[in-house]
Image: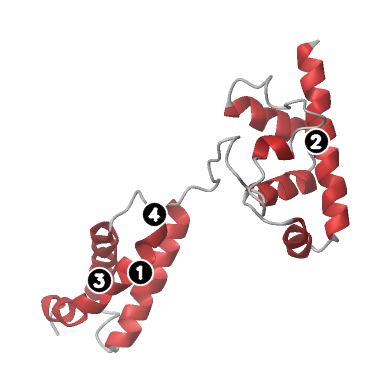
Amino acid sequence: MSFEHLITRISPTLKRITHRLNGHHSFFDDEDLYQEALIHLWLHYNDGSLSDKTDSYILQGCYFHLRNYLRKVQEKVPILSINTGVGEDGTKLEDILTIDGAATFDYLESKIDVEAKEEKYLTDREKKILSLIMEGMSMREVGAKIGISHVMVLKIRNKIKEKYLHLNNETLN
């Protein structure tokens, strides 16, 4: 079987797969993913590993390769504005990290400052909970994900707020 014959045979299905996988990525279009799948197929065709495989097996391999490829290249951290609604009820990130009307991010000049402060003052558990809250998970979902009660999640979230308020006060003084 020639490579051209293989591609002609599986191309329509491969294009549907790339279209379906590209639903969440603005930095790729379907053609980019299709080209990545063709490169993957070409490499495996040249080493002879596709000669005795069915079309279904080959397409499944392309699907898993593309999912892994997208997982590796997508941004690891979602970029959120402080005014973006992240809670179940559309609560803004600023409101989540505000105590008694005091904005806790006012003293920060850049995202680098935020990351430096988090690295220095937040525990790993607090960082994990904060990142899950920022992804829009509810307190119950966060608790279920990391194996603690939603009440404990609320307590840890309040502790994070207190730390940010304390850091804000230190910066202002």
For the residues labelled 1 and 4, the Cα–Cα distance comes to 11 Å
Residue name at image x 65 percent, y 32 percent? 115
Q: Can residue 104 be seen from the camera position used here? A: yes
Question: In the rendered image, which residue does mark 1 sit on?
Answer: 20
In three-dimensional space, the C-alpha distance between marks 2 and 4, rounded to whole angstroms, equals 33 Å
Q: Which residue is mark 3?
A: 15
Of tags 2 and 4, which is closer to the observer?
A: 2
Q: Give the CA distance from mark 3 to mark 2.
A: 47 Å
* Neighbourhood count class around disc 1 (C-alpha, 10 Å): few under 14, some 14–19, many 20 upward: few
The reply to whether discs 3 and 2 touch (Cβ–Cβ < 8 Å) is: no
Work out which quarter of the rendered image holds the N terminus and state it: bottom left
Label ID, residue 25: 4
Q: Please indicate whether residue 82 sits to the left or right of residue 169 in the image.
A: left
Q: Nearer the viewer, residue 114 or 9?
A: 114
Earlier in the chain: of badge 1 and badge 4, it is 1
Residue type, label 4: His
Q: Nearer the viewer, residue 151 or 5?
A: 151
Judge the density around disc 4: few (<14), some (14-19), many (≥20) Cα neighbours within 10 Å. few
In the rendered view, tell whether residue 165 sits above or below residue 28: above
SS assignment at label 3: helix
